[in-house]
Image: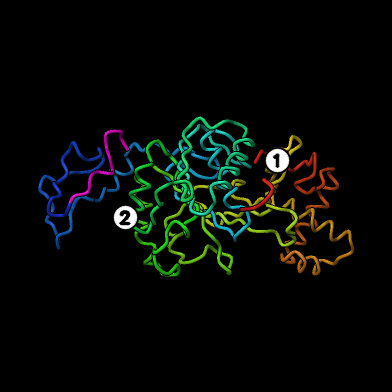
């Protein structure tokens, strides 16, 4: 859109809505000289654009906010079962965005402002976790990274299910390109039953309005027993990306934060960017928290090969790891090919792992 067109014009009532003039409208909208007749009191402020005008419009391409993860004006969700590490994950993304740095296989081309709204963590934990995320980052945040926390503010953080709650967030969005809401369960109390699609309608309208204004939003949500995000699937309707974090089948509690990352919905992302990865959060040689990741195929190839070497049959391996027999067969084939080429799969925490990408970040999942 051109710089002089503001899609967030002040709302007026249907009876007060003036007709659009040539100076008010974007250049590709045809303005009728005769105002369209109002029907049933509905404002004609929103108008259709003819195909030729739309196709001929000079719309600049959206830029990456976090390359391989979110573009400008994207709406996305990260969901995971409790304790897996979704807050750590989103805090790492927040620091990378504000610093123009890297996080896992993703990178922020330029620093952008972030507003992180936290409705769950005690302030002491929030302080510690963000300090660890900053220390582990490959760059210092230079764009504003603001934190609005229910446990840090003297006044309450109002429910986003209310106009007052959404207005409260809006007052702090100046300079922010990314809004992170962690989590929608705690930030939207009183919105109604989670499985009720109508309970999400006001939030969805607000998210679309933020997108029109150029703000990207990352929702953080809990996972249900079925493995999907908890509650109504309507939450995903307007989202560009949905990311699931889940524990591997062979996970043990002593490992801390180790999870698989899956894009279950991706719009505008292709190729290797959406392939699943396995992520681990631990300590580096200098004692600073460190993220490690590798393609999920490599992680599975290592585990399948190890169990095969221990004498387990492929059906037994499939049952042990909770994966299909075909996946076991492909993983074993991949491991054997890597072994022949001298590039055997190794666990992501191993020093010098060929297929492991390392990046700073903590040991326990939240």
Q: Picture coordinates of residue 30 (x, y %)? A: 20, 43
Identity of the residue drawn at 46% across and 59% down: 236
Q: Is residue 192 above or below residue 47?
A: below
Residue situated in front as seen by the camera: 289 or 93: 289
Q: Picture coordinates of residue 168 (x, y %)? A: 35, 48
Earlier sequence position, callout 2 versus callout 1: 2
Residue situated in front as seen by the camera: 64 or 31: 64
Task: Measure how far apart labels 2 and 1 are at the Cα level.
Answer: 44 Å
Task: Say few, some or many: other residues with alpha carbon within 10 Å of mark 2 (under 14 / 14 to 19 / 20 or more).
Answer: few
Q: Report if the CB atoms under discs 2 and 1 are less than 8 Å apart.
A: no
- The reply to whether the magenta stretch includes residue 9 is yes
Give the colouring mode of the picture: rainbow
Q: Is residue 337 above or below residue 311?
A: above
Q: Secondary structure at mark 2?
A: helix
Predominant SS along the magenta part: loop
Residue situated in front as seen by the camera: 218 or 262: 218
Task: Give the residue number, with chain letter if any, for mark 2.
Answer: 163
Q: How many marks?
A: 2
Task: Give the residue number, with chain letter if any, for mark 1.
Answer: 357
Answer left or right for 171 relative to 266.
Answer: left
> In which quadrant of the rendered image does the N terminus lie?
top left
- The reply to whether the magenta stretch includes residue 273 is no
Identity of the residue drawn at 66% across and 54% down: 260
- The residues colored magenta run 1-12
Q: Picture coordinates of residue 278 (x, y %)? A: 68, 51
Residue situated in front as seen by the camera: 230 or 244: 230
């Amino acid at each position: 859109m051109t710089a002089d067109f503001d899609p967030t014009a002040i709302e007026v009532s249907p009876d007060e809505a003036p007709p659009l003039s040539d100076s008010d409208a974007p250049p590709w909208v045809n303005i009728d000289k005769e105002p369209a007749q109002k029907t049933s009191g509905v404002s004609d402020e929103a108008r259709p654009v003819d195909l030729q005008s739309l196709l001929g419009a000079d719309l600049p391409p959206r830029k990456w906010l976090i390359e391989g993860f979110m573009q400008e004006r994207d709406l996305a969700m990260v969901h995971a079962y409790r304790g897996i590490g979704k807050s750590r994950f989103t805090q790492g993304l927040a620091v990378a965005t504000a610093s123009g740095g890297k996080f896992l296989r993703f990178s922020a081309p330029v620093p952008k402002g972030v507003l992180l709204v936290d409705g769950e963590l005690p302030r002491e934990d929030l302080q510690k976790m963000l300090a660890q995320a900053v220390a582990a980052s490959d760059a210092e945040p230079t764009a504003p990274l603001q934190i609005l926390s229910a446990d840090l503010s003297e006044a309450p953080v109002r429910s986003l299910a209310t106009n007052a709650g959404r207005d409260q967030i809006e007052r702090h969005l100046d300079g922010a390109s990314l809004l992170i809401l962690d989590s929608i369960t705690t930030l939207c109390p009183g919105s109604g039953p989670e499985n009720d699609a109508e309970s999400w309608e006001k939030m969805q309208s607000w998210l679309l309005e933020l997108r029109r204004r150029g703000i990207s939003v990352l929702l953080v949500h809990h996972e249900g027993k079925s493995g999907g995000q908890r509650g109504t699937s309507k939450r995903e309707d307007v989202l560009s990306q949905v990311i699931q974090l889940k524990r591997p089948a062979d996970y043990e509690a002593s490992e801390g934060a180790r999870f698989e990352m899956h894009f279950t919905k991706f719009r505008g992302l292709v190729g290797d960017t959406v392939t699943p990865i396995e992520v681990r959060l631990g300590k580096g040689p200098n004692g600073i928290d460190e993220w490690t990741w590798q393609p999920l195929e490599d992680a599975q190839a290592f585990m399948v090969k190890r169990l095969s070497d221990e004498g387990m049959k492929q059906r037994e391996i499939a049952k042990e790891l909770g994966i299909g027999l075909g996946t076991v067969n492909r993983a074993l084939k991949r491991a054997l090919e890597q072994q022949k080429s001298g590039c055997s799969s190794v666990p992501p925490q191993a020093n010098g792992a060929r297929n492991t990408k390392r990046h700073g970040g903590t040991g326990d999942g939240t």
